[in-house]
Amino acid sequence: MATGKDLFDDSTMTFGEHLEILRLHLIRALLGLSVCVIFTLIYGESLVRLIREPVDQALRRANFVKVKVEVEDNVKGFSLWEWFKHQVFPPDTSDANLPENAPLVTPEARRTISLELSAHELADQLHQALPGTYPVAPDELKEKKLILKAQSESFLQFRTGIEKIERPVTFNVQEAFVTYMKVSFVAGLILASPWVFYQLWLFVAAGLYPHERKYIYMYLPMSIGLFLGGVVFCFYAVLPVVLDFLLGFNARIELTAQIRISEWISFAIMLPLMFGLSFQLPLIMLFLAKINLFTVQHYLAQWRIAVMVIAVLSMLLTPTPDPMTMLMMMIPLLMLYGLGILLCIWTQAKTPVEIAT
């Protein structure tokens, strides 16, 4: 039966005043978002390069590892042990260890290749062609090498083609521009998120009691920290491992992976977002304990079910079907499950003191 009680009977503001405050804070949030998006549009190219960096590095590592595997490993199919060794002891692909004919910076150098010849074979060939002019090649030349520089426009075209293999690709002319706008908008939203959340918080805080605001001040920074921690962990720790695993699998079955930039951007945005949301697990556990839906004893007694639930969530939240991404999310979540139990115990220990004060 309806009681006739209005939602705003206990409020000092009318419904219209609430809407006016909501409109004011939304306008302020949108203005802040617009300024941040304009700023990120100016630096959009740098942002695209930043998001591309994990896949660019993974492609370079994959090409380097592929050469090593073809020379040193004749085992067919995917070898988890070989992949694991490359993760623990990655090959050094820095510029200092690149071969002498690696792509250089200047256009003139990019048209030049270095040819390594045996001095003995060259002298022997000259002797066979003109025996009256060139003597028999002496044996001491067998260990000597000659480096000859050769220049041609074809060498530049060849190097350009090789370098394109190590870059993401686009399948239509507007894809790069759409990707640029998408990255700029998402980066602007992230940059403006503290201001947007602050405006939303000012609206919500108007309807909360002082003791309710205390919990928001306590747990909101923790929530933001966990979210950002999940995003950073995914971008710098998970993505390189996942890319090495997937690209290494392509190399093992002799396939060349060409990564589409729009698909990579979506993946690079979605996966860190899922990690950031999943890292809220300790606060969710604390909230369920606060409303007496679960207790610390329940969390400890049902740990086996918790492991199964975390495994299922890790499988559903990761956008790729490979087991490596799932494990990279599942293992931190298991650690965060323990952190959630510790938070519940810590808040229970502080509750009597707060009541006494």
Image: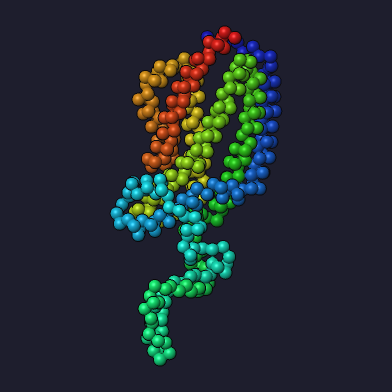
| Residue closer to the observer: 343 or 195 | 343
User: As drawn, is 172 to the left or to the right of 88?
Assistant: right
- Residue 312, horizontal then vertical, whole percent: 38, 32
- Residue 325, horizontal then vertical, whole percent: 41, 40
Total residue callouts = 0
Q: Is residue 162 visible?
A: no
Residue 304 falls in which quadrant of the image?
top left
Residue at image location 41% in from the left, 34% down from the top? 331
Residue at image location 51% in from the left, 67% down from the top? 157
Q: Is residue 125 above or below residue 308?
A: below
- Residue 284, horizontal then vertical, whole percent: 49, 24
Q: Is residue 349 visible?
A: yes
Q: Quadrant of the C terminus?
A: top right
Colour theme: rainbow
- Residue 198, horizontal then vertical, whole percent: 64, 28
Residue at the extreme bottom:
132
User: As drawn, is 111 to the left or to the right of 15?
Assistant: left
